Image (cartoon, grey):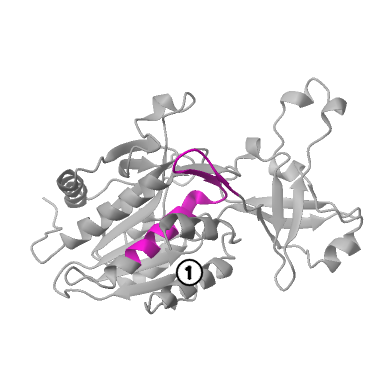
Amino acid sequence: MTIRDDLIALMGIPGLSGHEERVARWLRDRLTTLNIPSRTDRLGNLIATLRGDPKAPSVMVFAHMDQLGFVVRKIEADGLIRVERLGGVSERAMAAQAVLLCPPGHADVPGVIMNKAHHATSPEEKYKVLTTPEISIDAGHGSKAAAEAAGIKIGTPVIYHPRVIPLAGNRLAGTAIDDRAGCAILLAMAAALKSRIKGPTVHLVWSPLEEFNLRGAVVAAQVLQPDIAIQIDLMLATDTPDMADRGDMALGGGPGMALYSFHGRGTLNGVIPHPALVRLMEDTAADLNLPLQRSAHIGALTDLSYVQTVGQGVAAIDMGFPMRHSHSALEVCDIADLEALTTLLLAALTRIDTTMTLERG
C-alpha cells in the first residue's frame, strides 16, 4: 500500500483522543503484514522497535493517532445531545458539520451539529459564533430513551464525520489529516527500515492523547529513553491570503522543519530544535536535492515539548508537512509532501552513527 492508501484508510477510522483503540488495531494489523513486531503500553502507545547499532544514538520517531472532537455531557429529554469539546476545536467552523457518535459496544451513530434556520435568525445572530456549550447535536432520536437505546450516554466520544475528498493533483481534503498523515508516514518508514543494513536503533511510536494535553508520547519516551526524538506532524501552510503574513510554508513545496514553536496560550511550552539535528536535516535535504521549508511560529504545540525533557534531555526536532485548515472538519494536504518527508527522514536516519555528537557547546 502507498502512503496515500494508508492515509485514506486511517482518515476513515474514528479515534478521539483517549479512544484510539480502533486506529491502533488497524496500525497493528498493518505492521503484522509487514512482519514487524509491535507492542502497546498502558496509555495506548503503539511501539515498533527496529534494532540497529547499539553504539549509535537511539532515535524515537513518532506521530499521534488521536483526533480532536467532543464528549457527550448531557442528553436532553427531546433526544438532542449536548457536548464538551476535546482538544482545540475551531468553534467558528463547527456549525452544521456532520459528526459521528461512537458509543462503545454499539454501532456508530451519525448526527449533525444544529444550526438555527437562516430565515429565523435575527441580524445579531447571523454574525455570532456559537461556542461548544451552546450547540446541540441532532442524531434523529426523538427522545432521551431512544438516544440511550442506541448506546449514547454521558462520556460517549464524538468526532467529525470521517470523509475524504480527492482534490486536484496530489491533494486530499479530509478528516484528521492531523495526524493520520504522520501515522501513514511512520508505516512507510517501518516498511523501509525493516530491510536496512545499517543505522541506529529506531523506535517508531504511534502515540495517543496528543490532542488532550500532549500526554501520550512522553510516556513512551520515559520507557524508551531515546537520545534523539523526531516528531512528525502538520506545519501551518501559509500560502493562502489569510495566512500569508505567518511564514513561507507552501502546500506542495516539500517537507518542513520547525526552527521555533511556542504555544503562547495557556500551555507555555514549545520547542527550539537541537542544532545537530537542524544540520542533519539541512545537509540531508541538500544532498538529496530536496526542498526543505522552514517554520517559526507561535500558536501551535506538539508533544515533543515534553519528550525533549525526559531523562537527561533528548535532542529533539519537529519535522512535518504543510497543511491547510488545521483543526477544522476538512483539512488539506499534498501527498507529494508526505512522500518527500518520508524520503528525507529515512535518509537522515542513515547518517546517525557513532560519530554523531549531541553535546552542546
Residue for badge 1: 27
Q: Is residue 187 magenta?
A: yes
Q: Percent position (x, y) of residue 75?
A: 83, 57
Q: Is residue 66 visible?
A: no
How many numbered marks are there? Answer: 1
**In front of the other: 299 or 138:** 138
The residue located at (42%, 25%) in the rendering is 244
Q: Residue furthest left?
A: 355
Region rendered in magenta: 164-190
Task: Locate the N terminus and report the quarter of the image it occupies.
Answer: bottom left
- Viewer can see residue 219: yes
Q: Position of residue 240 (x, y in %)?
A: 46, 27
Left or right: 252 as drawn, with respect to 14 = left
Residue 173 at x, y = what percent? Answer: 54, 44
Crowding around mark 1 (Cα neighbors within 10 Å: few <14, some 14 to 19, many 20+) is many
Relative to residue 45, is residue 128 depicted above or below?
above
**Kind of element beneath mark 1:** helix
Report the residue at 35% width, 60% height from top.
307
Left of 203 or right of it: where is 149? right
Q: Amino acid at mark 1?
A: Leu
